Image (spheres, coloured by chain):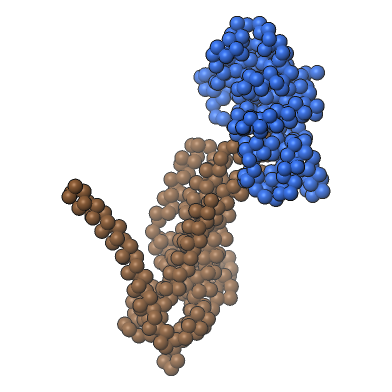
Amino acid sequence: MKKEKIIEGLFFINGMAVIIVLLGIFALLIINAIPAFKDITLKDFLFGYVWNPEAYTTPSFGILSMVVSTLMVTIGALLIAIPLGIGTAAYLTDVASPKVREIAKPIVEILASIPSVVIGFLGIVLVGPWLAKLTGQSSGLNAINGSILLAVMALPTVISLSEDALGSVPKAYTEASWALGGNKWQTLLMVKIPAAHSGILAACMLGMGRAIGETMTVLMACGNAPAFPHAFTDPVRTMTATVAIELGEVPYNTTHFYALFAVGLVLFVFTFCINLISDLVIHKK
Amino acid sequence: MNKVEISNFNFYYGQTQCLKNISFDITSHQVTSIIGPSGCGKSTFLRCLNRMNDLIPGVRMDGVINIDGQDINAPQLDVVSLRKKIGMVFQKPNPFPKTIFDNVAYGLRINGIKDQDYIDDKVQESLKNAVLWDEVKDRLNSSALALSGGQQQRLCVARALAIAPEIVLMDEPASALDPIATAKLEELIVKLKEKYTIIIVTHNMQQAARISDMTAFFMQGDLVEYKHTKQLFTHPDKKITEDYITGRFG
């Protein structure tokens, strides 16, 4: 009896430790972000588009440019990853022979294990020069570059979850469609994808969560110009890249230091909302 | 008039032979039922008629099935247009997770029909033919999954009728239904034979006796006996048929 109580206690401590660490991170973000608003108004912070914290006379802390940059790169990535990912998932469940599926599926999963710095490297030496040639600009380090790389990183998530969703559509639906004279393509487009829509939507949301929080790749491939972007061919600096670049250099306990934590908090709110929505979508049924 | 002619038809799943040298003819505008114990090959046979078994890997067949004098397994035959000629109702009601209207309209839409008035008319007509119209006319845009099991099955009948088939295949359509829903469905089947040729697989011998004109008794892949329903149930030729219909096994 006593032994069992001890074991029970051990598991309880384990479980609690995870929760405490999570809450701790959240608390740290908030505690360090709040002092920033002694010097910056919330309006200037959220809607100002000049981020120049080291300015000699009047430093400015507007994050709008980087929020827009982050959203641009993320949405660009999704525009590439969602059609490609659902297409691949449909191919794997409906078209590929079992042999092809057995080879292709692990390859997709290996794609997820490539370190982000390696993908960023590809962005600099491969995608960058190619984009520069294509657009006629001097450098190919810009928002499209980041979008392409993030799409590659989000693809495994989108593919594998969409494939699960399509695979769990009851066979009875497929048979009913075939019996009515539907071909494979119509069955997929008009029966299977609509039937699996909540799973596919969740796959896209989780892919988005993966893309929005990614740091190293966008830091390497997007050009890091802290200006308001006007086109996908502009170099951009995302929220994650800003924190990664500046936090190592900033003097402690300055407004700049606290403002970076506030940027982190905004990012946290973004990813938290995305995960929450995808969770709601998955459990809606 | 013979709608379907089956001669020397064999069917194999891998090494196992499921249908052995089946030969018989099915008359148009009649209800033909196929009875037999579980695993006798009756569902497999039904699924050969609209080539649903094509989709299962490792199946083999020989012999001939002609529908309207045309070999349905001929290589040049377009299986999609074959299936448009043959409606199918499955054992478990399987409406799509769409609205009632969209379920019935599906078959029309995949056939490229865009005329909304025509689709509206056809949906209404099919639901009326399936004796479901009065129950659903006020909620055509609610989900089909909210219907009761019996209603769902009649919706599946309506969905099959919407593509104007000539033959309707039914694979134990009443096995998941309660007695009242079953009675309604049987009434519907008898009514439908004016317009369609109906082939129904059933577990339930009373059902076969009530609704069908001809009955085929299958046993372990063999066609044991095929004759008018009345005769088969009152004067079976073979001892084994008599044993089955009197409930000595099965």
Residue B64, quarter of picture: top right
- In the displayed structure, would residue A79 be above or below residue A249? above
Find chain A in the image and tell me its colour.
Answer: brown
- Residue B112 lies, with reference to residue A206, above or below; the image says above
Left or right of A149? Residue B230 is right
Quarter of the image where the N terminus of chain B is located: top right
Q: Residue at x 26, y 54 (%)?
A: A11
Q: Residue furthest left?
A: A2
Residue B155 percent coordinates (x, y): 69, 39
- Residue drawn 53% across and 62% down? A77
Residue located at (44% from left, 47% from top): A107
Q: Nearer the viewer, residue B135 or B164?
A: B135
Q: Quadrant of the C terminus of chain B?
A: top right
Note whether residue A151 is visible.
no
Q: Position of residue B110 (x, y in %)?
A: 71, 43
- In the image, farthest residue toward the front: B180
Residue A45 appears anywhere in the view: yes
| Residue A254 coordinates in the image, percent (x, y) | 35, 85
Colour seen for chain B: blue
Q: Position of residue A231 (x, y in %)?
A: 58, 73
* Relative to A146, B171 lies left or right: right
Along the line of sight, the residue nearer the viewer: B30 or A159: B30
